Amino acid sequence: MATELISRDQVKEEDTWNLKDLYEKEADWESDINLIEEKVADIKKYEGRVCESADTLFAVLESAAFVSEKLEYAYCYTARLFDQDQGNTKHQGMNARMISLIAKVGSEVSFIDPEILACSEEALNKFFDTKKELELYRKQIKEIQRLKEHTLSAELEKVVALTAEMSNTPGEIYEAFTNVDITFPNIKDENGKEELLTQGNFVPYLMSANREVRKEAFETYYHTMKSFVNTFAAAYNGEVKQRIFHSKMRKYSSNLEAAVDANNVSPQVYDNLVNTVNANLDKLHAYVSLRKKCLGVKELHMYDIYTPMIADVAKKVTYKEAQETILKALAVLGDDYVALLKEGFENRWIDVYENKGKQGGAYSDTAYGCHPYMLLNYHDTFDDMFTTAHEMGHSMHSYYSNSAQPYIYSGYKIFVAEVASTCNEILLLEYLLKNCQDKKERAYLLNHYLDSFKGTVYRQTQFAEFEKITNEMVENGESLNAENLSSLYKDINERYYGPDMISDDEIAYEWARIPHFYYNFYVYQYATSFCAAVAIAEMILTEGEPAVARYKKFLSSGCTDAPVELLKIAGVDLTTPAPIEAALKKMGDIVDELASLV
């Protein structure tokens, strides 16, 4: 690991994403901005007349879809420029301008849904009969009608839309502080060499086989975070408060209900996950006990949770090696799927390595009409290979849906967003297990499987429970602060990991490093999606082509139905506890197998 991160202009071109696939030059982006503004001005002329006739309704819906598609495309460009180096002031300005434009457009076109809701069913049916082209928008109109109870008057919708930019402020403060402003001290690596601790290398250091390195990285990181914990608390308190404003304005009983209803999901699905996982904490406690035994320590600490339980097996996985393995593992999904993976790897869909100012973590994003883009911070670890497979799953989901659906139905709901990504990971792991001949290596892979269950089902549900409780605290009139947030987080952590884990004082501040707490009840979907992916991967590997065909139909479905219904296409019903219970039973079986090998 370098003592200092390289600047963006030092990164090799082949390791960066090619943003010219979006716009050849900045002037083309400017041209689209002008086009958006012109089209919005045209839409404004229909205010008060949306349902005047079938022709006006069609014209408004066509124009609104055009503007939305162009906005998404233009924002994809500036967001990628911004994320590759968030210290670049020019790109900061471009991205801020884009965010302002999105908020402005939202306000300008906010009259559309209320006017459609004010139109009678009889009139709408007549429009569908007289204008066949309107059929494309039937599902969209039904979705607008589904949210009728939570849609405001045209005037109030405009007011709420005007708050969008302001509502993003807590998350923007958090991103700027964690990705640009905060600096961590140096620590000593495995060779005793002074190295700079960063957001990107923190977890790789926690995976170190050297316990002193793990301990120093853990304590250094969280002591630094603790010194700014009041700032983090204020930002998060602001995030929850802006959610309350929106949920109250839209007549929801809670922030949770407002968040999940946007995806046409019931709060009971969220509660079902938290309750089912809490009823199965014994599997996580058994995993923790096994980890303590495998590491041979008298006390297991939170800085021991990332390092492999099986020593001397972990090896570096270069980016090229990761690509080769992923292509082999996902061959079960067919030649067309593999061809798309190769296209992504070979044609610069991916920004691979960490550089100064770059957005931390990893993600996939797309704009209709262009291929997906992936951000990685690759450090040649085994986990980085899985992260690459994970983000490629997102990219493939987007590609299949964008290819099969018109723009208005191409964007899949967040509830199913983690299914394809996690399915890729599980298929990769099952491939490695199948082709593993060495007992110790198999134990290492089973360890990784268990870590996936721990990190994706239990850890994300732990986050989901924390997020639900903190939102309820503010809804009940309590203000969030550094003390109550840290105390609550530590209590939940102790309950989840059980008696064999020392919940170090520093872990109380872990909530401050989780960006997903600004994503409005996002994290629970990692857990539900993981459980769904376990079931889908099992069907693909046992049934073969019929299961693959069902899965690709799901991938191609966009948002053409409620997400829980779309998952049923792939053979999974998340309205019941069954998939979660089955997945956690599998975890229990893997704990038993690994225990028999060590």
Image (tube, rainbow, N blue to C red):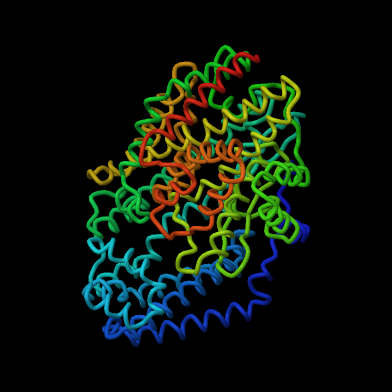
Q: Quadrant of the C terminus?
A: top right
Q: Position of residue 201 (x, y in %)?
A: 65, 41
The residue lying toward the viewer, choosing from 342 and 106, is 342
Q: Position of residue 521 (x, y in %)?
A: 39, 47
Quarter location, residue 448: top right
What's the residue at 67%, 38% (across, down)? 186
Query: In the image, 569: left or right of 78?
Result: left
Observer able to see residue 235: no
What's the residue at 56%, 44% (across, down)? 547
The residue lying toward the viewer, choosing from 12 and 202, is 12
Location of residue 67 with respect to 321 vertically, above or below = below
Observer able to see residue 346: yes
Q: Quadrant of the N terminus?
A: top right
What's the residue at 33%, 63% (across, down)? 143
Q: How many marks?
A: 0
Q: Position of residue 284 (x, y in %)?
A: 48, 24
